Image (tube, rainbow, N blue to C red):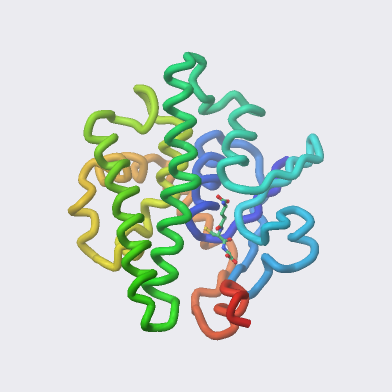
Amino acid sequence: MLKFYYHPSPNPAKIALYLEETGLDYEMVPVDTRRGEQHELAFLKINPNAKTPALVDTDTETTVFDSTAILLYLADKTGRFPLPDDPTAKGQALSWLMFIATGIGPYSGQCVHFRHFAPAGNDYGVNRYDFEAKRHWQLIDDHLAEHRYMAGDKYGLVDIALWGWCAPLPFIMGDDNAWDRYPNIKRLFDEINERPAAQRAQALKSQAEFKSEMDDDARRHMFPQNR
Ligand SMILES: N[C@@H](CCC(=O)N[C@@H](CS)C(=O)NCC(=O)O)C(=O)O
């Protein structure tokens, strides 16, 4: 049995999609980060980084945190959506997977922070992260202009990782029309959204009550540097 520590946000969404695609038996454990549950001692034993997602594999008593580590762990454990065997294809798949983990995720996250949540007067930060987020997403769009999927010729692990970050793209960019800039990502996002597994992954958020307001209390939990 897999215990999946989840919040309805981009990195956990990757794991929700993987679990739904594979039909693995799992239990969703809500972690309401706007209520500070990521800082509870029991959760820190699972993820000392105090973020979602995390996974406990009770079959092997293994704990895994960080979305990309979880994807690789599950692909290795189950053989579903594996990395390619061919070294060249594997190199490409790993490169794009890590580009999403270390580029798309952190730059988009900081872009959201400075654009929507930091106190006013951070023009330098907004400019820096807006530029880097746009540059990263453009590299993905350029790649998808030449390739139907992120790695190889079929839907796979890297597409699953990318999907997690696609839904908030207009919010990240602060632009309701942001999809106009990224037609190739939109094509793949729409294709994945048609998959029943993606619809089940999106519906997971309705299985628990997550706080939606970003009030002062939520800000204290999410941005502890301001305490
Ligand atoms: N590198 C980590 C990042 C995890 C992360 O930033 N998770 C966010 C949700 S997308 C979170 O739990 N934020 C709560 C907080 O920062 O307190 C991963 O890929 O899992």
Q: Nearer the viewer, residue 205 or 189?
A: 189
Q: Position of residue 10 (x, y in %)?
A: 48, 55
Q: Residue furthest bottom?
A: 216
Q: Residue furthest front?
A: 124
Which image quadrant is residue 146 in?
Answer: top left
Does 62 sit above or below residue 47?
A: above
Q: Is residue 116 left or right of residue 85?
A: left
One can see residue 82 in this view: yes
Residue plotted at (35% across, 22% down): 153
Q: Position of residue 226 (x, y in %)?
A: 58, 80
Does 191 sit above or below residue 38?
A: above
Does 215 sit above or below residue 223?
A: below
Residue plotted at (43% across, 45% down): 198
Q: Residue furthest top?
A: 86
One can see residue 197 in this view: no
Residue plotted at (28% across, 35% down): 143
The number of discs equals: 0
Q: Position of residue 129 (x, y in %)?
A: 37, 62
Look at the image and tell me in which quarter the N terminus lies. Answer: top right
Does 70 sit above or below residue 207?
A: above
Residue plotted at (44% across, 48% down): 103
Q: Nearer the viewer, residue 55 or 223?
A: 223
Q: Position of residue 65 (x, y in %)?
A: 66, 48
Q: Is residue 118 left or right of residue 177?
A: right
Q: Nearer the viewer, residue 20 or 38?
A: 38
Assign ligand 1 to one image quadrant.
bottom right
